[in-house]
Amino acid sequence: MRLGLSIPLLNEADSITEVVASMHAVLEAGDIEHTIVLVNNGSDDGTRDAIDSIAIPGVIEAIHLRENVGYGGGILTGLAHLEKDGFPDVVGWAWGDGQVAATALVPLFEAIQAGADVAKTVRTKRQDGPWRKVISAGYGTLMRLLGSNTRDINGCPKLMTRDVFLAIEPTAVDWFLDAELILAAEQEGFVIADHPVAMERRRHGTSKVTARTVAEFTKNIAGWRLRR
C-alpha cells in the first residue's frame, strides 16, 4: 500500500525542513512507500525556498500557491496533485508545525492496513495555550450536539483509504475540512480508528487558528445541520 500525504503550509519556513525530514525518515524506516506533497499556501516568508530545497521528485513534491486558499483548500490542492498520477491506496493530511511527532504516521497507516477506513490522532496532552483549549472544548461540544461520537475531531494526521476519500469527496476549503470528513465518515458507517498522541508546544511560528476560524466553523456547522 502506498501513502499520499498533503501538508498545507503558511509561513512555516523555520520548521518545515525538520518536520518533513522526520516524516520521511519515519516512513522509510516503516517501509511505507509514500509521496508527501508540500503546499506553500501563500506564504510570505522563506517557505518557498525551504520546501524547494528538500523536494525529491515522486517522494517529496512542492506546490506553490500565490494566494492563500484556506486550510482545507491547501490540503485539497495537495490531494488533487496526488490524483493526477493515480491516487495512492491511502491518502490524508498532516500539519507542518511539528506539534505532533511524525512517529504517529506508522500506527495510523497500520490501522488502515488492519481494516480501518479512517485513522486519526487523539491529542491526550496539549501545549497550545488556553485560547486553543477553549476553542477545542467548543468544537467538542458542537460535535456531540451533531451526534458525533468521535473524540478530538480535528486531530491530525488523518489517513483514509482512497475509496473512503472518493466516496466522501470533502469540499471544505477552510478549517471545517476535518469535521466534514469525520461527520460524513460516521454518517456512512465507516470504521474510524484513533491513536493517542501528545501535542507539543510550537517551537517556531504562530498558530493559524483565530477568531475568524471559529466563526467559519460555526457557519459551516449550521450549514451541515441544514443539509442533514
Image (cartoon, rainbow, N blue to C red):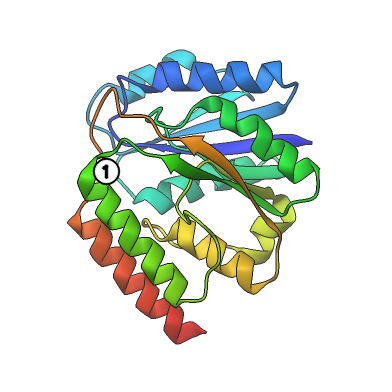
Picture residue at 30% right of the left edge, 19% below the top: 14
Judge by depth and name the residue closer to the eye, 71 or 194. Answer: 194
Question: Can residue 171 be seen in this snapshot?
Answer: no
Q: Where is 40 relative to 151, above or below?
A: above
Horizontal and vertical percent position of residue 80: 56, 48
Q: Is residue 174 left or right of residue 104?
A: left
Q: Secondary structure at mark 1?
A: loop
Judge by depth and name the residue closer to the eye, 53 or 117. Answer: 117
Q: Where is 183 relative to 48, above or below?
A: below
Q: Which residue is mark 1?
A: 208
Q: Quadrant of residue 149?
A: bottom right
Horizontal and vertical percent position of residue 121: 54, 44
> Quick one: label 1, few (<14), some, or many (20+) residues within 10 Å?
few
Query: Which quarter of the figure is the N terminus placed in?
Result: top right
Picture residue at 69% right of the left edge, 37% below the top: 109
Horizontal and vertical percent position of residue 51: 42, 21
Q: Where is 217 relative to 51, above or below?
A: below
Q: Quadrant of residue 190?
A: bottom right
Picture residue at 72% right of the left edge, 42% below the top: 111
Question: Can residue 115 be seen in this snapshot?
Answer: yes
Picture residue at 22% right of the left edge, 46% below the top: 130
Q: Is residue 120 left or right of residue 127?
A: right
Q: State how many labels appear.
A: 1
Q: Is residue 207 left or right of residue 105?
A: left
Q: Quadrant of residue 25?
A: top right
Horizontal and vertical percent position of residue 136: 34, 55
Three-letter amino acid code at disc 1? Answer: Lys
